[in-house]
Amino acid sequence: MRIPLAMHQTEIEVRKSRFIAIAGIVTSAEDVKQQVAMAHKEHPQANHVVHAAVWGPDGSQYSMSDDHEPKNTAGRPVLEILKGSGITNIAVLVVRYFGGTLLGTGGLVKAYGDAAKAVLDGLKTEELIEKESFTLEIGYELYDQAKKILHEYGAQTNEDFGTQVVIHGTVAMQKTEELSKAISNLSSGRHHLEKA
């Protein structure tokens, strides 16, 4: 599974109706509700704010809404595209401004599906990897070497500089033990990763 790195927005027009598709990051039903509420607030004149969302490590949790479009013509096609995308922790909202021409049920399914595909096309994602948080307190004399090792293991870090350097970070769970050994070896056993 992959996860989105940042929000993304795009727009398509179908027979004078505007479909603004917004992809956002979610990890719970509450996140989805907040994003839908925000879209309603940002687009008070919109006729519909349809959504579909998939979240959880295996993408098994989801929600959707047709927001007063005919049943299964809006949220369902967006959800099906999300389920087939291999992306989790994502909500796609499609804001529709009606252009005066009725699209019919088939036209709506296609338009909402196309809007979802368009926003996913430009979305930046990364592999979903379980990460573990850690803290490392180390002397200045070993800082550069420790930083290099952390980088080699793909750790994301930030530092606090005091009498010692305190490094807070995250690393892929399967690399934690190896990284801990590498730091211990570097410091002749004096420094260890503390799991947060």
Image: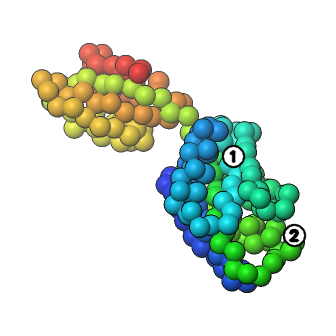
In this image, 14 relative to 124: left or right? right
Tell me the quarter of the image containing the C terminus.
Answer: top left
Mark 2 surroundings: few (<14), some (14-19) or many (≥20) residues within 10 A: some
In this image, 74 relative to 158: left or right? right
Residue 105 position within the rendered picture, expressed as x and y whole percent measured from the top left: 87, 70
Rendered image: mark on residue 145: none
Name the residue beneath numbered marker 1.
Answer: 54
Foreground mark, 1 or 2, reads: 2
Q: Which residue is at a point 73% across and 81% down the rendered structure image?
A: 100
Residue 10 position within the rendered picture, expressed as x and y whole percent measured from the top left: 57, 70
**Nearest to the observer: residue 100 or residue 147:** 100
Name the residue beneath numbered marker 2.
Answer: 105
Residue 4 position within the rendered picture, expressed as x and y whole percent measured from the top left: 56, 52
Earlier-in-chain disc, 1 versus 2: 1
Q: Residue 97 sits in which quadrant? A: bottom right
**Nearest to the observer: residue 8 or residue 123:** 8
Q: Residue 17 sits in which quadrant? A: bottom right
Mark 1, secondary structure of its residue? strand
Up-down relation of residue 124 to residue 166 (above or below): below
Q: Which residue is at a point 74% across and 39% down the rendered structure image?
A: 60
Q: Is residue 75 visible?
A: no
Residue 101 position within the rendered picture, expressed as x and y whole percent measured from the top left: 77, 82
Cα gap from disc 1 to disc 2, whole angstroms:
24 Å
For the view shown, which residue lies furthest in the front direction? 45
